[in-house]
Image (cartoon, rainbow, N blue to C red):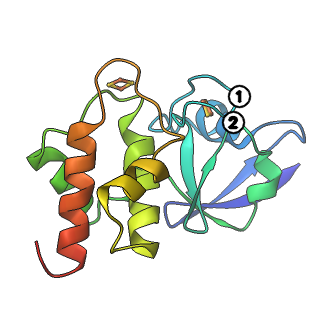
Amino acid sequence: MIATFSINGRTRDVDVQPNQTLLDVLRDTLGIFDLKEGCSEGVCGACTVLLDGRPVSSCLILGLSARRRRIMTVRGLAGDGELHPLQQAFLRHGAVQCGFCTPGMLLTGLAFLERHPNADRAAIREALAGNLCRCTGYAKILDALEAYARELNGRG
Ligand code: FES
Ligand code: FES
């Protein structure tokens, strides 16, 4: 069936199968590859998108359930050719790791800090519990998110 999606501020009409996950709709049907497929079972966070501002694992939900809701992938963060301040913080702190984990870390971290700008490092770490990196580490990512939180609070 044809369903209407709002993706990174743009409306798209898409032919969707009832059993397709949102991950499959975005990657396989629409060719939006900035979200990744890792575990396909809701564990790794590589497929994270924001749905109405909240992070979800797109491998766990049906595409049709996201109709007419705001979907944001990491590509939607930058505006007018400028990186989002959180992306800039990731760059400054050397937190841009691989393309599998970084998009989900950015989106989950952003959604969390927008709701909890005073969160401390432990709370930020807990918020990222569903975004896994098995090869590098989390220290620089946490540094970047803490720096962004300070910016949000006018202490950057
Ligand atoms: S691919 Fe969705 S959580 Fe791992
Ligand atoms: S999974 Fe991306 S750096 Fe480890």
Q: Vertical placement of 132 versus 114: above or below? A: above
Does dot 1 land on a helix, a strand or a loop? loop
Tell me the quarter of the image containing the C terminus: bottom left
Q: Is residue 16 visible?
A: yes
**Residue type marked 2:** Cys
Q: Name the amino acid type tagged 1.
A: Glu
Where does residue 100 sit, x and y in percent of width and height?
Answer: 42, 28
Q: Which residue is mark 1?
A: 41
Q: Quadrant of ligand 2?
A: top left
Q: Residue 77's image quarter?
A: bottom left
Mark 2 near ligand 1 (CB under 8 Å)? yes
> Residue 94: x and y, percent?
13, 38
Residue at 43% across / 53% down in the picture? 107
Disc 2 element: loop
| Dot 1 beta carbon under 8 Å from ligand 1 | yes
**Relative to residue 64, is residue 151 drawn left or right?**
left
For image coordinates 81% across by 43% down, the residue present is 16
Q: Which residue is mark 2?
A: 59
Rendered position, 28 above or below 68: above
